[in-house]
């Protein structure tokens, strides 16, 4: 079983407009689609699409929290959340007829110290049953910048692999707890090293540095359409993604993390783990719905996804 931890869940609302967005006016929404959101829930859907058992945890609260659980039930995602007093946030994506999108992300209402303590217990309980645990995205106010360091440490003490995909201080502060894998994009690796790698050679050096100096088993830097670079004990690998007509790339990194967890749980070789996760992530780019993809499409894209050892 794979477990995903989403501290900052949301009801993601896609507002489709039938005319261009005009600020300062009344806009009528043509269609509204609600989705169970938060980056870990995209990863959870990827795990389910890969055909593995999934348990999604995190914080939910209020009526939005109940709706979120119903949406996950409809997606066939098993969940075991900590129920907080504050209402789960909403995030709104306004889509214009020409494909332009404008996102409004609520920050996430605060959680209490007691609720954070309940989350530590929940993660300990789920980690004991899980093959791999993933931590994705931001955290609500009240959780503190050390929350992932604490939760990753709980998973590692249980002897289970932990994958971390977050940004800023949450990412930097958690490295001492030695997550098994981190998946920064170039902005996120900049937060760790204090410099933004520009060329592939600099990205290779950066991934290697985080692997060696911080003792992180697997460092996977994702580069959007340019693929990825992975540093681990087996070497440094360059992954190349197939050329595709992208429909919606949002959530590709989350899909990559969910599929990586599956590949790790299935005991694939490291090169194969990367290629499998990348082909699922590219398939996500071909689906309009964030964090949804078709496994048959991922299998087709696998032959155009290459992984080569570069160091
Ligand atoms: N344009 C694209 N064409 C083909 N594959 C892509 C494209 N964009 C992303 N991918 C695949 O998805 C993987 C992850 O993408 P990306 O680096 O954009 O993640 P991210 O920035 O963490 O995204 P998010 O946080 O929105 O999930 C890439 O390594 C690649 O395999
Ligand atoms: Mg990401």
Image: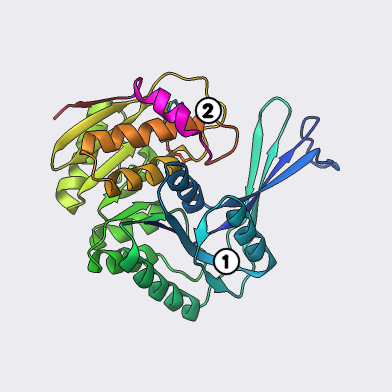
Badge 2 crowding class, 10 Å Cα cut-off, few under 14, some 14 to 19, many 20 or more, is many
Residue at horizontal 36%, vertical 20%? 304
In-front residue for pair 76/150: 76
Identify residue for label 2: 286
Q: Is residue 101 above or below residue 118?
A: above
Residue 112 in view (yes/no): yes
Q: Position of residue 78 (x, y in %)?
A: 50, 59
Res 60 label:
1
Q: Position of residue 19 (x, y in %)?
A: 81, 30
Q: Position of residue 143 (x, y in %)?
A: 46, 69
Q: Mark 2 touching mark 1, by CB under 8 A?
A: no
Tell me the SS state at disc 1. Answer: strand
Q: Which residues are magenta?
A: 292-305
Which quarter of the rendered picture does the N terminus lie within?
bottom left
Determine if the C-beta at disc 2 is less than 8 A from ligand 1: no
Where residue 7 appears, as percent x and y from the top left, is 48, 62
Whether residue 222 can be seen here: no
Count every numbered label the image shows and give the total.
2
Label of residue 171 in the image: none
Q: Report the residue at 42% width, 41% height from top.
A: 50
Going from N to C along the chain, the mark reached first, 2 or 1, is: 1
- Image vertical order of residue 127 relative to residue 21, above or below: below
Q: How is the image coloured?
A: rainbow
Whether residue 90 appears in magenta in the rendering, the answer is no
Q: Name the residue: 47% across, 79% down.
A: 113
Residue 208 lies in quadrant:
top left
> Which residue is pictured at 80% across the width and 41% down the height?
29
Q: Considering depth in this image, is 25 or 112 the residue closer to the camera?
A: 112
């Amino acid at each position: 079983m794979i477990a995903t931890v989403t501290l900052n869940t949301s009801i993601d609302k896609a507002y489709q407009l039938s005319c261009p967005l005009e600020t300062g006016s009344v806009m009528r929404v043509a269609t509204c689609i609600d989705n169970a959101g938060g980056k870990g829930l995209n990863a959870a859907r990827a795990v389910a699409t890969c055909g593995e058992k999934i348990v999604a945890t995190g914080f939910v609260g209020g009526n939005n929290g109940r709706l979120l659980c119903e949406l996950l039930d409809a997606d066939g995602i098993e969940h075991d959340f900590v129920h907080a007093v504050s209402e789960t946030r909403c995030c709104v994506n306004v889509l214009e007829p020409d494909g332009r999108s404008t996102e409004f992300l609520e920050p996430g209402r605060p959680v209490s110290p007691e609720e954070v303590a309940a989350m530590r217990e929940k993660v300990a309980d789920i980690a004991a049953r899980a093959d791999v645990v993933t931590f994705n995205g931001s955290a609500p106010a009240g959780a503190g910048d050390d929350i992932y360091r604490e939760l990753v440490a709980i998973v590692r003490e249980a002897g289970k692999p932990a994958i971390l995909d977050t940004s800023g201080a949450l990412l930097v502060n958690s490295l001492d707890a030695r997550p098994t894998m981190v998946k920064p994009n170039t902005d996120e690796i900049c937060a760790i090293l204090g410099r933004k790698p520009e060329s592939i050679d600099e990205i290779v050096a950066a991934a290697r540095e985080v692997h060696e100096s911080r003792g992180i088993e697997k460092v996977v830097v994702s580069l959007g359409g340019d693929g990825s670079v992975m540093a681990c004990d087996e070497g440094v690998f360059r992954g190349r993604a197939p050329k595709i007509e992208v429909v919606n790339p949002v959530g590709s990194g989350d899909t990559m993390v969910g599929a990586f967890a599956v590949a790790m749980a299935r005991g694939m070789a490291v090169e194969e783990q990367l290629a499998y996760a990348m082909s699922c992530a590219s398939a996500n780019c071909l689906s309009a719905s964030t964090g949804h993809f078709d496994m048959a499409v991922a299998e087709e894209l696998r032959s155009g996804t290459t992984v080569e050892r570069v160091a």
